[in-house]
Amino acid sequence: MGKMYFMQGNEACAKAAIKAGCRFFGGYPITPSTDIAEVMAEELPKVGGTFIQMEDEIASAASIIGASLAGAKAMTATSGPGFSLMQEALGYAVMTETPVVFANVMRGGPSTGMPTKPAQGDIMQIRWGTHGDHQIIALYPSTVEEIYKYTIKAFNYAEKYRTPVILMMDETLGHMRESFYLDYEDEFPENIERIKDKELEADDLFHPFDVSESSSTNPLVEMGRSRFHVSGLVHDETGFPIGNSDGAEKMIRHLDSKIRLHAQEIALYDEYMVNDAEIVVIAYGSTARSAIRAVKMARSEKIPVGLFKPITIWPLPSARIKALFKNSQAIIVPEMNLGQYAQEISKLNTQNRHLEALNKVNGELITPEEILESIIKVWIQITEM
């Protein structure tokens, strides 16, 4: 039997991480993500896990990479300025194909910005914050129940694709409290577990970076059970650095293809009343909560509008968004930034449909009424064409 819970968003993230098998947290307190660290500090020792408050965010990110390579599922949590400091380590995790989870509870920026206010300004930093060609997986829930559910999914994606995964939230989601029902067996599939029984001869060298199959990855065997080398340099299948151009290209293309070629199965999203929609609102995170209300209000006024809520922010759910452009007359993208996601979506607008961006960067949530006003404005425009 399931159970009804009443949790804060950050609390749900921490408890779901433990449910997913996380046994190491290395972090540094920063508003508005500190609650995740506080819950982890209390709960991890109860299950034999380890919590360490590191000296800064750079050390926090490095510590979870080391813990993961040593065999523990690991995560950290931070916000904008801290996430900026973690970018070098994030790139190292990409290159070394180390499964870890970064929770980024977004706040206003740049720099110190607005620590206690919600924002969605890290969308492009999450995609391209670290240097070089790479793919990234990023999930963005919009309810406390979804935070729990997709924290578990983030750990599973990290293990399956051997990659860092970013769990995105914003200040409102992190601090709000909601009740929700959990039936563990029905709602959550079996967690992906790390291989722990790999038996190798003493002189054998495990090949954790074998890219003979460019769109797949070898499972990671914890250090101590096998011999392998780890390097942030371009490397061969053994992990040792290489200097030839063919090997370098093979390595970089593998990091791209193992996620890009599986984008369809990684893509998670919800839809509401899009089948007959002439206008589709694309909204994520806290903004999606206002958007669903706005869509219901518009429908009561006989305006054919629907909602597409991407949960997988990266990789972009391109196929479905292209279909939305094809089957509707206009797309509206409300977001608490100056149009970061709308700009990416516009690249998929091969039908040359009307694309409306609704942006807010004053530390306040976008309201249902503001989205409804945009819907009405666009509806008048397309009906008068």
Image: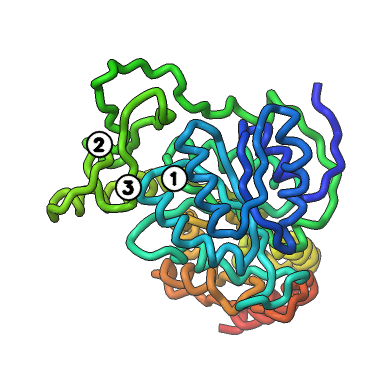
Q: Is mark 2 on a helix, strand or loop?
A: loop
- The residue at the point 65 percent across, 71 percent down is 334
Who is closer to the viewer here, 203 or 208?
203
Q: State yes or no: discs 1 and 2 in contact (Cβ < 8 Å).
A: no
- The residue depicted at 74 percent of the width and 42 percent of the height is 41
Camera-near label (1 vs 3) is 3
State the mark number for residue 231: 3
Work out whether residue 351 or residue 90 is closer to the camera in this orientation and state it.
90
Earlier-in-chain disc, 2 versus 3: 3
Pinpoint residue 182: horizontal percent, then vertical percent: 77, 32
Q: Residue furthest front?
A: 55
Circles 1 and 3 in contact, beta carbons < 8 Å: no
Residue 345, image x and y in percent?
48, 68
In the picture shown, does residue 332 fall above or below 187? below
Q: What residue type is labelled 2?
A: Thr
Q: Position of residue 191 (x, y in %)?
A: 57, 28
Give residue 108's position: percent from left, percent from top: 68, 74
Residue 206 sits in which quadrant? top left
**10 Å neighbourhood of mark 1: few (<14), some, or many (≥20)?**
many
| Mark 1 or 2, closer to the camera | 2
Quadrant of residue 171 within the rendered picture: bottom right
Q: Going from the N terminus, do you reach mark 1 or mark 2 first?
A: 1
Task: Decide: is 377 above or below 213.
Answer: below
Within 10 Å of disc 3 (Cα), the crowding (few <14, some 14-19, many 20+) is few
Disc 3 marks a residue whose amino acid type is Ser
Q: Nearer the viewer, residue 181 or 211?
A: 211
Which residue is at the front of the view, 250 or 24? 24
